[in-house]
Amino acid sequence: QKEVEQDPGPLSVPEGAIVSLNCTYSNSAFQYFMWYRQYSRKGPELLMYTYSSGNKEDGRFTAQVDKSSKYISLFIRDSQPSDSATYLCAMTNQAGTALIFGKGTTLSVSS
Amino acid sequence: DARVTQTPRHKVTEMGQEVTMRCQPILGHNTVFWYRQTMMQGLELLAYFRNRAPLDDSGMPKDRFSAEMPDATLATLKIQPSEPRDSAVYFCASGLASGIEAFFGQGTRLTVV
């Protein structure tokens, strides 16, 4: 079993839909939880991160962490075609150390 | 415009040949990561450096892969000899020891035939 599991999808939704992306993990030492977005043929870029448990909101994006269940989520409200990309969860136990990534979920938002 | 620069962007080589990939981290960043991305495995950590010293290279096949940082502005990843199963996109990323974010380069797309 990999340390971080993520359903690769693909996930297809119409414009305006609410999207839910999820990851589970096995290492209870993870403290920092991130979501990266990767467009085709580009490197991943940090979307947002959360420290420990709780919620964090940034515009149309909300990240949730439930450490008791070892489960993290990213919600996208009012999804746009420009949100079409691969979303990768990542986590680490300490700042400045290597991130462990999920495989990524490919999202397609149609207009 | 601070960014991680990787060269070459694309590389096609024959099995058995040596491949060298280069990375210029963002100026001032003291942590450098090498990742490999495939459809099957996703993003896998190969190695990472702090202040040019290797901290972890347990994800790298040691018999054929090697990673170095000759100076603070250059990181290299070598494969010798290359094999078709090494075909993947190799990403370099840099960051700060105190930071959360890893800044990724555009990647080197390697095809070994």
Image: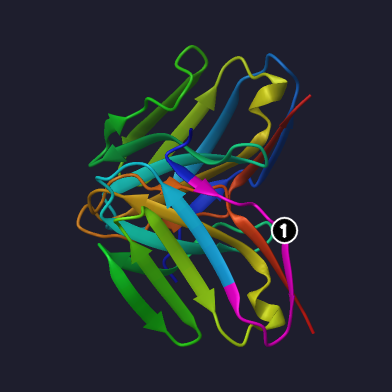
**Residue B93 visible within the image:** yes
**Residue B24 visible within the image:** no
Q: Relative to A103, say whether B102 is above or below.
A: below
Q: Position of residue A15 (x, y in %)?
A: 72, 85
Q: Is residue B29 magenta?
A: no
Q: Nearer the viewer, residue A57 or B51?
A: A57
Element on which disc 1 rests: loop
Q: Nearer the viewer, residue B22 or B106?
A: B106
Q: Relative to B43, say whether B54 is above or below.
A: above
Give the residue pinned by disc 1: A10
The mark total stands at: 1
- Which residue is depicted at the point 24% across and 45% down? A29
What kind of residue is marked 1? Pro
Q: Chain of mark 1?
A: A
**B95 relative to B16 in the view: left or right:** left
Q: Relative to A95, say whether B91 is above or below.
A: above
- Which residue is depicted at the point 29% across and 31% down? B54
Q: Position of residue A71 (x, y in %)?
A: 41, 57
- Which residue is depicted at the point 45% across and 34% down? B76
- Which residue is depicted at the point 51% across and 54% down? B105
What is the span of residues highlighted in magenta in the rendered image?
Answer: A5-19
Q: In which quarter of the view is residue B86 placed?
A: top right
Q: Nearer the viewer, residue B76 or B96?
A: B96
**B37 relative to A108 in the view: left or right:** left
Q: Position of residue B96 (x, y in %)?
A: 26, 56
Q: Where is the C terminus of chain A found, in terms of image quarters? A: bottom right
User: Seen from this angle, which residue lies furthest left?
Assistant: B98
Q: Nearer the viewer, residue B35 or A8?
A: A8
Q: Relative to A64, say whether A76 is above or below.
A: below
Q: Position of residue A12 (x, y in %)?
A: 75, 69
Q: How is the image coloured?
A: rainbow
